[in-house]
Image (cartoon, rainbow, N blue to C red):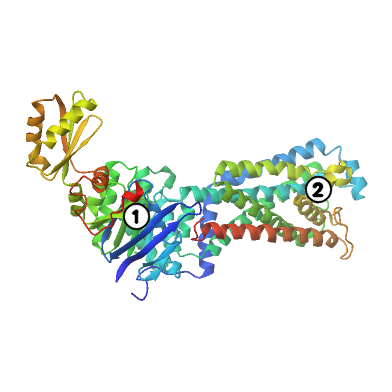
Amino acid sequence: MAAISATDVELVYADGTRAVRGVSLEIPEGEFFGFLGANGAGKTTMIKTLVTLLRPTSGTITVNGYDVTDRPRAVRSSIGYMAQETSIDEELTARENIRFACDAYGVRSADRSERIDTLLDLVDLQAEADSLAKSFSGGMKKRLDVATALVHQPPVVFLDEPTTGLDPEARNRLWDYFRTINDDGTTVFLTTQYLEEADQLCDRISVIRDGTIVADGSPAALKSTVGGDVIDITLTEPTPETIQRARATIDAIEEAELSVEPTESGIAVTASNAHSLGPELITTLAESFEIAGFQTRSPTLDDVFLALTDESNEHGNASSDAPMDLEADQ
Amino acid sequence: MSSPPAGTRNPFVVDCWINLERWLRKTVRNPFVVVSSLLNPIIFLWLFTAVFGSVTGGALTSTLGENVNYITYLVPAIVIQTALIAASSSGIGLVDDIESGMFEKVLVSPMRRSAVFLGKALSEVLRIVVQVSIVLGLGYVLLWADTGGAVGTYVATGWPGVVGIFFISICFAVWFTALSNLMALWTRDQESTIIGANLVQLPLLFVSSAFLPLAVLPGWIQTVARFNPVTYGVDAVRALMLGQDLLTVISINWFGGVWNTLVPALGVLIGLDLVLGGIAVWSLNRATSADVE
């Protein structure tokens, strides 16, 4: 049985905004699922609907086998949820925050102390356990928030953009915790705007745009949607005219499967074999242009969107059976 | 999967206690808030009695028919002011929770919503009992100093009267608690909620029977005071302090003695509690239900 199952979910706000437009999801137990989208794409609305904070306008959702509309309390007691904004009581200590969560989720008092200690260890807050949360850094608060979402060892955990705004070190620590709980069998539903994050953590990713799922598959499949890594080339004189000529030059290279997009400082070339292709491209370009620099990087969400929405891109539909009705939203 | 593998639900009383405990912990942890919110009432009690104590004798004697010390007369007003301030902080706590995300965190937990709010309300009741005790004690000390130790009767109706004063304070606080929570839900902003609560506080107190008998106040104040809940709260507490019927805005003589004040005053307050409390509960329910706003 699926841990999370959603069928044709629509959510329309009172002002008429159609935040979620017919989303269906089937997430098996134990999966690390990524819900990828830009700001305003509908990620948070969807996650709030899944955790019973919003009622779907139409469609059905079950979490752990319970219908979110008919049995909201059963859903609530069987899930952990971490909101996008850090949600802790700053006037309480770390231990008290976790204790309150333990009580709220009915953790037996015999198990409580041990559970609190285990969680404090998990999120590395044992040393600060009895300090007021208001004295914590942003990363520490976030870690405490994670701990409070796990007190009842929920089989499904929802994480809404858990690392947005954190420094790389804090982010990496959180990733480790998420991997740990997923390795222990917990189903994880994570929303993120970073492809890298989804790539690092998730077994499967759905990309949401304007309330609709536009792509669905493993991180590798999604990356192939983009068509590989990206080479950013900076031109010394990035005028519209030189950029146009540089694009034409690249396009003239027959052998490689690649696509070229203009950027502010030059061009971006996407190719499946970007790393081996790089030197050749640069050599060819250097014959007619002054190149200030170049860099090969992994595709970003922007690149995914470009690939998904760019009609001329031959890799556009590579990944899946996902609906591609993007024209209507443009 | 037939049952959730984790997470249980508590009995109603336990949910209540969990939330009561959290709010008490926060209150005790911030003694500054408890003390500073008493500062205004204490300054009022001390300065008003010092400034007006010597000139109010005539007004009190002419309306009450006996020589009443202004301290004894003023303490009921300060008791109600204390309840008013405590009630206004309820909404501030709610906004605090909304802003910190704790509100949503509690909503997504399996705790019953009614228990969540009842627990918070009970912590406010406890706070009012403590603060009113402090005000009553302080009034006694001031009176003791003023009379050179010959206090005589402080609360005319005795210990049952003191219990009654707590009860009236709580009845009085409910409607303003409801109002302050409504303000919190409307504005969802801490500053607006604080400013809003402060804004209505002083006019409510002054345009009532709080500081002087209505009979010696201008006609328009007498008219407005009739519709001001503070008048009913202060007169009810004062009736217990002085042991006489002194509610002038509603004249009823069916019950005898202080009951002629207590019954109609509490009737008005409890009626108001039910109406505003009902609206607040309805609004909170709406704000916390999963229906899209």
Left or right? Give the position of A19 relative to A308: right
Quarter-of-image position of residue A178: bottom left
Q: Residues within 10 Å of mark 1 (few under 14, many from 20)?
A: many
Q: Is residue B19 left or right of residue A25?
A: right
Q: Position of residue A279 (x, y in %)?
A: 7, 34
Front in this rendered view, residue A49 or B275: A49
* Quarter of the rendering occupied by the N terminus of chain A: bottom left
Circle 2 crowding by C-alpha within 10 Å: few under 14, some 14–19, many from 20: many
Is residue B134 shown left or right of residue A163?
right
Q: Which mark is residue A212?
A: 1
For mark 2, give the secondary structure: helix
Does B237 sit above or below residue B44? below
Query: Residue at left 18%, top 49%?
Result: A315
Kindly report which numbered mark, 2 or 1, lies closer to the viewer in this rendering. 1
Q: Badge 1 sits on which subunit?
A: A
Q: Nearer the viewer, residue B28 or A144?
A: A144
Q: Which residue is mark 2?
A: B225
